[in-house]
Image (tube, rainbow, N blue to C red):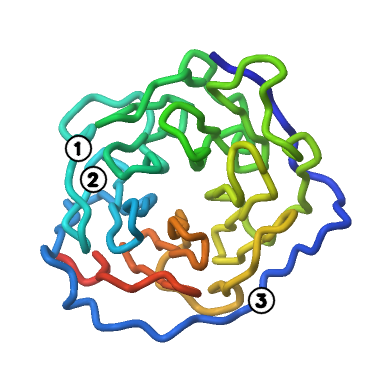
Amino acid sequence: MRSRMLAVLGAMALAIAPVIGLVDAPPAAQATVAPVLTPGDRVVGMASTADGQGYWLATAQGFVFARFGDSVPYGSMANTHLNAPIVGIVATPDGRGYWLAAADGGVFAFGDAVFSGSLGASPPSSPQDRVVGIGAFPDDSHYWLITAGGSLTVFGFSSGSWPSGWADISATAPNAPFVAVANWGTRSDFQGVWMEGADGGVFTLGAAPFYGSTGGLPLNQPVVGMAVTPSQDGYWLVAGDGGVFAFGGAPFLGSAADAG
């Protein structure tokens, strides 16, 4: 059930600072399995495991690459007809499931992730309305979708149960369309979000700390998603070619950038 649409474009007095600062990372050989992108497919998002020692990569055709660190597969939309490509993935807090989101607002739940609604019945009417990512609160049933224009639609909350501070979130437009969003804080103490642009710029809203970005750096492919460590002391960015960039306390555990 769709709960509420929040427009997140407009001026905001909170600090929004896409600053360049890529951290050093171990070699990609740490990946347990080298995933292979099929011709015409591309990585569109990533999600962290519960302990932050692994992650999943999702592709536009619905594949989910696991085995990075301690991630394990729970299912995918691979080889399934999709009305629109997959654009994002986000995991449940215990790491025993995840949601996939499609560009038309469709949501697909796997493992212990609970389906709480989607926008699949209301296709986007303009490029700015196209869904580009999915984020989740620290439980297995609440999530939101973000559009290229920066609007958020939240699912799973009943009237009056919104987290503290949620209604005050807004942002200025990035240099490139938004592609991802992630939560900072807890359900009972909501403090802000990270928002990610296709150029790799990371925007911090509210109390969400800034750990670095690829904004202003040359990239082989645009950034398509982000994931936050469970301790919220770092995050990963992922590009369309499967390249992974780690910041703060997020460990680098491999990428799909060099896969055939």
What kind of residue is marked 2? Answer: Val
- First of labels 1, 3 by sequence position: 3
State which quarter of the image contains the C terminus.
bottom left
Q: Which x, y percent locates residue 155?
A: 55, 23
Q: Which x, y percent locates residue 180?
A: 53, 49
Establish if 153 lies above or below 174. above
The tag on residue 19 is: 3
**Farthest residue in the left direction?**
33
Q: Is there a contact, CB below 8 Å, between mark 1 and mark 2?
A: yes
- Foreground pick, 141 / 108: 141
Q: Which corner quadrant of the image does residue 211 belong to?
A: bottom right
Establish if 218 lies above or below 150. below
* SS under mark 1: loop
State which quarter of the image contains the N terminus.
top right
The tag on residue 64 is: 2
Q: Which x, y percent locates residue 145?
A: 54, 34
What kind of residue is marked 1? Answer: Tyr
Cα distance in 3D space between marks 1 and 3: 35 Å
The tag on residue 74 is: 1
- First of labels 2, 3 by sequence position: 3
Q: Residue at x 35, y 24 (%)?
A: 83
Local packing at callout 3 (Cα closer than 10 Å; few below 14, some 14-19, many 20+) is: some
